[in-house]
Amino acid sequence: DVKVTQSSRYLVKRTGEKVFLECVQDMDHENMFWYRQDPGLGLRLIYFSYDVKMKEKGDIPEGYSVSREKKERFSLILESASTNQTSMYLCASKLRDRIYSGANVLTFGAGSRLTVL
Amino acid sequence: AQTVTQSQPEMSVQEAETVTLSCTYDTSENNYYLFWYKQPPSRQMILVIRQEAYKQQNATENRFSVNFQKAAKSFSLKISDSQLGDTAMYFCAFTSLEYGNKLVFGAGTILRVKS
């Protein structure tokens, strides 16, 4: 059974702390994503990685950075956590889309609920 | 930019009845893909159904079907014979090969199935 595993389901951090959210997938997927989920706003893309050491900003990258040193692992980093970063964070992965196969399906992790006090 | 709009924040339906969730999108592209994802209260997001824009036939997966109106840029999800396990947040999503492997999601619709 294919899996995307997020290291923490619940985290509570203080303003100004550095926060690491880890995501690991075992499907050999090229693409990995970090989304933020907020009520009424749906899922918004923070960062996207299409290969090892490659990354691309999503719609709301401010205050976040990412790291992808290995194909299976994609980390989201909050350099200095703020209260407005309290949210649900979802990691997802998929195979790279190709013309002959069309758009592939995202596989999601269970999510990480971050509270910043 | 691509946008996805779900105009129904919440809906409810009686068990065994049929419900339709609405989704509209905006794009200038001709070849793209649309998805419905389901997020049950346990929060693991899973795919419900997928539609390829170049296919005129509406996608169907058991009790789930879509009404894809390309000209109107509408992509609604119909759930027949609703079950308690269908209670979840449903997200409509859009992607295209030109959009670089990324998905754009709507705000979501909370569906409650009542017994």
Image (tube, coloured by chain):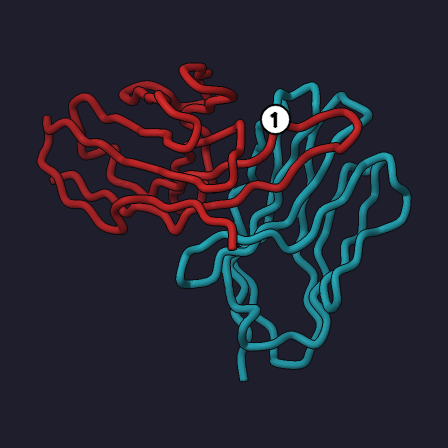
Q: Amino acid at mark 1?
A: Asn
Query: Which residue in the protein does label 1 denote?
Result: B101
Q: Chain of mark 1?
A: B
Foreground pick, A22 / B10: A22
Q: Position of residue B105 (x, y in %)?
A: 56, 38
Is B31 located above or below residue A6 in the figure? Answer: above
Where is residue A35, by image quadrant?
A: top left
Q: Nearer the viewer, residue A91 or B23?
A: A91
Q: Residue at x 42, y 33 (%)?
A: A72
> Which residue is more in the foreground, A13 or A4?
A4
| As drawn, B84 above or below B9 | below
Figure check: A39 above or below A16: below
Q: Residue at x 71, y 47 (%)?
A: B50
The residue at 24%/43% (across/down) is A114
| Residue appearing at x 16%, y 39% in the figure | A116
Q: The chain drawn cyan is chain what?
A: B
The location of residue B97, given as percent across then percent down, is 70, 24
Mark 1, other Cα within 10 Å: few <14 / some 14–19 / many ≥20 = many
Query: Residue A46: x, y in percent?
Result: 41, 26
Residue B95 on image: x %, y %? 66, 31
Q: Nearer the viewer, residue B28 or A28?
A: A28
Could you tell me which quadrant the N terminus of chain B lies in?
Answer: top right
Q: How many marks?
A: 1
Q: Is residue A36 above or below residue A68?
A: below
Q: As drawn, is A75 to the left or to the right of B63?
A: left
In this rendering, would A37 be left or right of B83? left
Q: Quadrant of residue B73?
A: top right
Residue at the farthest right position:
B56
On the rendered image, what quadrant is the C terminus of chain B found in? bottom right
Q: Colour of chain A?
A: red
